[in-house]
Image (cartoon, coloured by chain):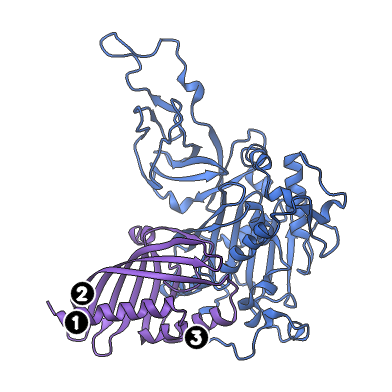
Amino acid sequence: MELELQLAVEQLHARYAHALDAGRLEEWPEFFTEEGRYRIATAENEERGLPLPVLYAEGRAMLRDRVASLRHANIYEPQRYRHLASSFLVQRVDDRVVSSTSSFVVIRVMQDGATMVFASGRYLDRIVVADMKYEERVVVCDSRRFDTLLAIPL
Amino acid sequence: MRAWPAEGATRVPYWVYQDAQVYEQEQQRIWRGRTWSYLCLEAELPEPKSFVTTFVGDMPVVVTRDPKGALHAWENRCAHRGALVCMQPRGAAERFTCIYHNWTYDHAGNLASVAFRRGIAGKGGMPADARPESQAPKQLRVESVHGLVFGTLSKDVSSLEAYIGSEILPRMKRVLVKPLKVLGAYTQVLPNNWKLYMDNVKDTYHASLLHLFFTRFRINRLTQKGGVFVSPDGAHHCTYTEMVEDRGDAYEKDGMRSAGSQQFTLEAPEVLDQVDEFGDGVSIQILSLFPGFVLHQIRNSLAARQVVPKGIDRTELHWTLFGFADDDEAMTRRRLLQANLVGPAGYISMEDGAATGFVQRGIAGSPERASVIEMGGATIGSGDSRITETAVRGLWKAWRQHMQI
């Protein structure tokens, strides 16, 4: 058990969640390596062996495009998330990379106060140890159902 | 029943989206009436004995392929007490057995056996003249067109291809050229009446005004070449846009919000890279069939969208994205990247959920008022301009005909 590594991974997940929940979307691509991949999937599609993403980006450029579109193009009601992440399993893959599996719940709060459990699921991560960035972050949502729209990343 | 506004085709009264009695009548006269509803893709029933569950309006439905390969659809309701017969969303089964009292059905939905029908050791059981089959699940007529499976409860509605008609059918065939391969599915829950979503799909006027992503990157502007087809009864529509680059500045001159900032460019535009796979230079085609089916081609993203009403102010949109069975790796990757354009997180589609929900909330105090649907006048028909609401008027022509309003 590498305690320092465990703590470092938990810190990364926590900083990621706080950045999104505070609306600091511009920081979001910086949690990934230059070629880092981000994919939101559903448990149902994963179990059926189907590749369809709800959202998919290969590399920071695509992640930045997503943020730019949310800031300057897409129309959606003001809303905030609260991420609750837990049950962090951390495993060293090799000298360079660790894998992490964790659980999450995202609560969505609309501007009028309407609050709902928007998503729950697992984060399946590959993290580069040297700079503690996501080489891959797969968000497997437990439900196939999404309320109205998914604008802010999970 | 409330009255339609005197203006006729150019007005849609808001009570159509709010009235519980209207919702109930729609279930009977439209969803269970003389219409064909999309059920699933044939590709979801690849093997004999496979099944999927779905809905036609509120009615739960099982779709099966029988041991000989024929397709069937039947109401997912046990003849005995009305429980769901099939609980799983998909799978394969020899027989369908209701968990409540073990009544069993074949792939066509026929009641095959009743547990302890003759009792045990001469005691109990049903009388010899009992006819539990009289309450058997309703069986739908099933037909498919190029890999899409449809069903209807109506005995006398015309064949599926005749129902779709000669204006729209060629536009379906244009996309469905080869055996399909399912890429995945998800559900978007819309906070509005189902007809607000169909209005939105048929509204060629909104697309480039609401969706900045379309307009800023010149994916779809009304100044680009395109057109709209509407079936003579108004029920079905198809709109398309050609790939030709639009260099005009009509949006910028008129100060449209959707023209956006010149600073907004994509760092990774390969998300939009299109291969002209149908060889006709069409970049977007949106096609709808009454009452609740949409087939889209947005660049190389292909999908079936099924509209499932869930009460007067709630609708589920069941998306199934697909490619072709012979897609190579590069095409599959392209389709998966372009999945970013559609669905609940779609650069384009996310806004439709927002806009239609805003209508449902905005009209709360005005059931007696009406939408103004007057772009393109009062006509209903095909044309080469998309600055028109002709297909929306078509929806309401068909709706009123079915609802006898």
User: Seen in the image, is A101 located left or right of residue B369?
Assistant: left
CA gap, disc 1 and disc 3? 33 Å
Could you tell me residue B346's position as x and y percent? Answer: 53, 70
Q: Residue at x 66, y 56 (%)?
A: B196
Q: Colour of chain A?
A: purple
Query: Could you tell me which quadrant the N terminus of chain A lies in?
Result: bottom left
Amino acid type at circle 2 is Val
* Tag shown at residue A33: none
- Foreground residue among B141 and B83: B83
**Which is closer to the viewer, label 1 or label 3?**
1
Chain assignment, label 2? A
User: Seen in the image, is B242 located left or right of residue B93?
Assistant: right
Could you tell me residue B118's position as x and y percent? Answer: 34, 14
Q: Residue at x 58, y 70 (%)?
A: A77
Q: Are marks 2 and 1 in contact (CB under 8 Å)?
A: yes
CA gap, disc 2 and disc 1? 8 Å
Q: Are marks 1 and 3 in contact (CB under 8 Å)?
A: no
Residue behind mark 3: B268
Chain assignment, label 3? B
Q: Dot 2: within a 10 Å radius of its alpha carbon, few (fewer than 14), some, or many (20 or more) residues?
A: many
* Tag shown at residue A90: 2
| Element type where label 3 sits in the image | loop
- The answer to whether residue B321 of the structure is visible from this angle is no
Amino acid type at circle 3 is Ala
Question: Which chain is drawn using blue?
Answer: B
Could you tell me residue A115's position as x and y percent? Answer: 48, 62
| Element type where label 2 sits in the image | strand
* Tag shown at residue A5: 1
CA gap, disc 3 and disc 2? 32 Å
- Determine whether B93 is above or below B350 in the image: above
Chain assignment, label 1? A
